[in-house]
Image (cartoon, rainbow, N blue to C red):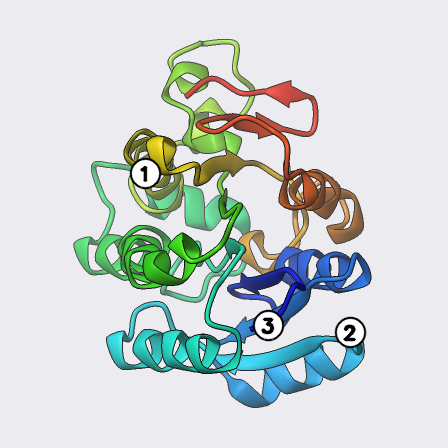
Amino acid sequence: MTDQKIALVTGANQGIGFQIAKALASNGYVVFVGSRNLANGETAASSIGGNAYAIQLDVTDKNSIAAAVARIQEAYGSLDLLVNNAAISHSVSRKTLEDSITASRASVASLDEVRAVWETNVFGVLALTQAMLPLLRSSASARIVNVSSGVGSLTLNSNPSFPYRQGFGVVYAASKTALNAITVAFAIELEAEGIKVVACSPGFTATALNNFQGTETVEQGSRHPIEVALDMNGPTGTFTGPNGPLPW
């Protein structure tokens, strides 16, 4: 047991997840750097230094999840912060973001691809959060941060003037809509226990998710998720982005 804050960040071996893990470590957290590939996680944790430790974690694999729970339980007995960052945008390699958007349209989307993306972005978040709840409940001030996206907002996509509206499809974008629903469900259920659950969007960030075609750098895109992850006093049940609150 320790008085230090313990955090787990999924998909933290690169991109926004890596930046979040790095910021948490620099602010005194013991950080578990979740990575499907342990070697990649070890490289990332070594780069972060300090109290950063690689942990093999595939959110689509129940055995991997169980092993991660057991490791954190044995080492610290509790978890103060869970950052559900791991996500994929497609399961088929494509050259451009435009190709992925076209392939995700409701009329033509591959159900196999929908299932593969939702397995990580939706069911993986649900499975991992459920598994980590006993550890979170052992914390005096637990929080769950789900890294979402504004493209999942039904309110925004219902507005004809929303510039990214044509990118709303049933693969990645709708998976973030479902993630937002999971966020609200957990926030409602856990509010009485004092466990805060929020969703945040990094904005249109250039990462592997969009073939690095975003308008913001990883450093720029990670700023808001880092702020949210470090904010112990914020409200529960919110959805925010770099410019403030976002509509569900």
Please identify the quadrant where the N terminus is shown.
Answer: bottom right
Per the image, the residue denoted by label 2 is 48
Q: Is residue 117 left or right of residue 44?
A: left
Per the image, the residue denoted by label 3 is 33
Residue 12: x %, y % from top left: 60, 67
**Residue mark closest to the camera, 2 vs 1:** 1
Is disc 3 surrounded by few (<14), some (14 to 19) or many (20+) residues within 10 Å? many
- Image mark count: 3
Please identify the quadrant where the C terminus is shown.
Answer: top left
Residue 124: x %, y % from top left: 32, 60
**Residue mark closest to the camera, 3 vs 1:** 1
Residue at 40 percent of width and 58 percent of height: 90
Where disc 2 sits, the SS reads helix
Work out whether residue 169 or residue 198 is closer to the camera in this orientation and state it. 198
Under mark 3, the amino acid is Val
Q: Is residue 74 left or right of residue 1?
A: left
Residue 233: x %, y % from top left: 64, 32
Q: Is residue 98 visible?
A: yes
Under mark 2, the amino acid is Ile
Residue at 20 percent of width and 37 percent of height: 107
Where disc 3 sits, the SS reads strand
Residue 133 is drawn in which quadrant? bottom left
Work out whether residue 97 or residue 215 is closer to the camera in this orientation and state it. 215
Residue at 69 percent of width and 45 percent of height: 230
Q: Which label sits on residue 186?
A: 1
User: Is the residue under label 2 in contact with that under label 3 (CB below 8 Å)?
Assistant: yes
User: Is the residue under label 1 in contact with that under label 3 (CB below 8 Å)?
Assistant: no
Residue at 78 percent of width and 74 percent of height: 48
Label 2 or label 1, whichever comes before in sequence order? 2
Q: Is residue 115 left or right of residue 243?
A: left
Work out whether residue 220 or residue 227 is closer to the camera in this orientation and state it. 227
Is disc 1 surrounded by few (<14), some (14 to 19) or many (20+) residues within 10 Å? many
